[in-house]
């Protein structure tokens, strides 16, 4: 059983920054893709960024490219999402997730991810 706990969310003004953290524990040996997803009220959950742990390759949804950076610290079993130049439209609940389907990591398909955290709220005001 994999446990994932997000932290670092909060309220910030447009143009500001936040860094989300996702602590991972439990049986993680087979998970080779980690991702951040978000869901705004009334909208479907969407992939934001993923990282393939085998080679470190990353993928981003176009709306956050150049502003968000996903990274991981294997020694701390933690995955991060650095979010800069935040926009009002980035407001959502952010979730971290993991999957064993590493080669499909870049697709950011929600249904490919089997382990999920509880989420952390990010609110960006104008």
Image (spheres, rainbow, N blue to C red):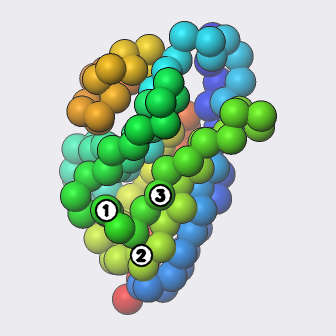
Query: Residue 27, position in %: x, y?
Result: 66, 11
Mark 3 or 2, closer to the camera = 3
Residues at badges 1 and 2 in contact (C-beta under 8 Å)? no
Q: Residues within 10 Å of mark 3 (few under 14, many from 20)?
A: many
Please, what secondary structure does the residue beneath circle 2 have?
A: loop
Residue at the (48%, 66%) spot, across then down: 83
Asked whether the viewer can see residue 121, the reply is no
Residue on which the image places disc 2:
86
Residues at badges 3 and 2 in contact (C-beta under 8 Å)? no
Query: Residue 75, position in %: x, y?
Result: 77, 34
Q: Residue furthest right?
A: 75
Quadrant containing the N terminus is top right
Residues at badges 3 and 1 in contact (C-beta under 8 Å)? no
Q: Residue furthest bottom?
A: 126
Location of residue 36 with respect to 107 vertically, above or below: below
Location of residue 56 with respect to 85 vertically, above or below: above
Apparent side of residue 64 relative to residue 30 in the rendered image (left or right): left
User: Which label's residue is closer to the chain start, 3 or 2?
Assistant: 3
Residue on which the image places disc 3:
69
Query: Residue 7, position in %: x, y?
Result: 65, 51
Quadrant containing the C terminus is bottom left
Mark 1 or 2, closer to the camera = 1
Apparent side of residue 69 relative to residue 91 in the rendered image (left or right): right
Residue on which the image places disc 1:
65
Location of residue 63 with respect to 109 vertically, above or below: below
């Amino acid at each position: 059983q994999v446990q994932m706990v997000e932290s670092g969310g909060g309220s910030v003004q447009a143009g500001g920054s936040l860094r989300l953290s996702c602590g991972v524990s439990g049986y993680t040996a087979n998970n080779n893709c980690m991702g951040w997803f978000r869901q705004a009220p009334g909208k479907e959950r969407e992939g934001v960024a993923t990282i393939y742990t085998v080679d470190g390759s990353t993928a981003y949804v176009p709306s956050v490219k150049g502003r968000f950076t996903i990274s991981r610290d294997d020694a701390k079993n933690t995955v991060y999402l650095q979010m800069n130049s935040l926009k009002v439209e980035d407001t959502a609940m952010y979730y971290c997730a993991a999957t064993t389907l590493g080669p499909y990591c870049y697709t950011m398909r929600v249904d490919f991810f089997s382990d999920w955290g509880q989420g952390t709220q990010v609110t960006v005001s104008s």
